[in-house]
Image (cartoon, rainbow, N blue to C red):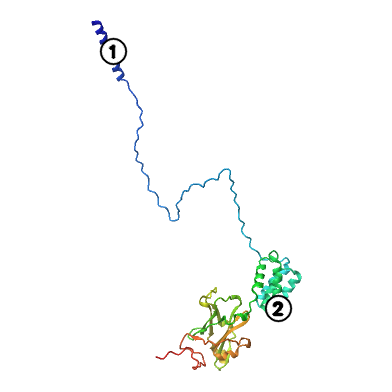
Amino acid sequence: MGLIAFVQLLIAGMALATRFEESRETRIVEKEVTKLVTVRIPAARAADEDEKPIVSRPPPPMPPPDLETEVVATPSPTPVAMPAVADPRAERLLNEARVARVAGDMGLAIVKLEEAMHRSSEEAGVHYELGLVHEQMGVFDTAAQHYEAVFGMGVSGAGALYESAAAKLRDGFEQPGDLLGKLSLGRVRIFKDPADPEGERVILTIPVQRAPGVEVAIEKLGVAVHFFNRNTKGEIVMLEDKSWVAEQWVTLPFDWTGGDESLRMNYLIPRQGGPMAHLFGELSYYGQVVSLHYDSEVLDVQAWPRDLAARIPRQEAFNPGEPQLPEFLNEDVLPPDFDPDIPLLLPLPEH
């Protein structure tokens, strides 16, 4: 019995020793630990006014593999150009004819165009220019024949002139008489400044009135003013020195705001002296005749004083309707021979 107890004590001691040795061994255990780290981020820079924010967008979806995408470009229309003149000599004659037509020399223009026609009879530009010349001369049948020749060439032969000739044949020809009553002179305003140090200055403001809806070709519109002076001998003479007059339209280009446009005429009679003034006398402003022209035809005429209407060429002595008296912008200066029986202003109502 004693032996068995000794063996048990020995086994228990060995077990205790083994456990003690195991407790002395170093164990390494790996674990993942989450740690919060503070990171300093600099403040975002303010966007400049010129910079635009960039917006990120997802790419467009790709088409399915079995479908094909076809991009078709639409061609832009090609503008129709002016037809070229094949013969250089005919081209030069055509340009010279245009210059003559604008200058009003229709005879020279026709001579140039007929020579160009002899060299090249199928030029659209020559036919169209002949149409313009005969239209301005009032020979509308001949003008229509040349426009029809251009129209018959089509776009391939006449280019941009095809549409212009078609418009001439479609709309007909505008005649100056058609604007009677639709284009006229308004009341002429007169400002006199005799105290100007350079001489006697007179400023006219001439309104040109247009009826609503009326088309006016500016290049055909003209205003002519004939100034008249009185010398110390009492003679009424027309102005000959055109350098005394400067003219200017008040507003360009014309927009006919309010239905009229105004032409301003600045007339200055230089101060005279010496032997020339003794021989011919001092000059002073007497009046003027204003005429409105459209395409070389007179549409309206105003004369002040009225007796000047008899001193202008006969073809300009035309004034439909009641004559309009001018308006003087300074009360102290009235024109010579002022007729008190024809007042400038309406009488004031009696109270």
Label 2 neighbour load within 10 Å: few <14, some 14-19, many 20+: few
Amino acid at pointer 1:
Met
Q: Is residue 217 left or right of residue 37?
A: right
Give SS at disc 1.
Answer: helix
Instruction: Tell me residue 191's x, y (percent).
Output: 49, 84
- Is label 2 or label 1 in front? 1
Residue for point 31% across, 18% down? 22
Q: Is residue 310 above or below residue 82?
A: below
Residue 290, disc: none
Residue closest to the eye, 186 or 278 = 186
Q: Is residue 131 above or below residue 283?
A: above
The quadrant in which residue 96 appears is bottom right
Which residue position is annotated with label 1? 14
Of pointers 2 and 1, the one earlier in the residue sequence: 1
Residue for point 28% across, 13% down? 14
Instruction: Tell me residue 248's x, y (percent).
Output: 54, 78
Instruction: Tell me residue 52's x, y (percent).
Output: 45, 53
The quadrant in which residue 309 appears is bottom right
Label 1 neighbour load within 10 Å: few <14, some 14-19, many 20+: few
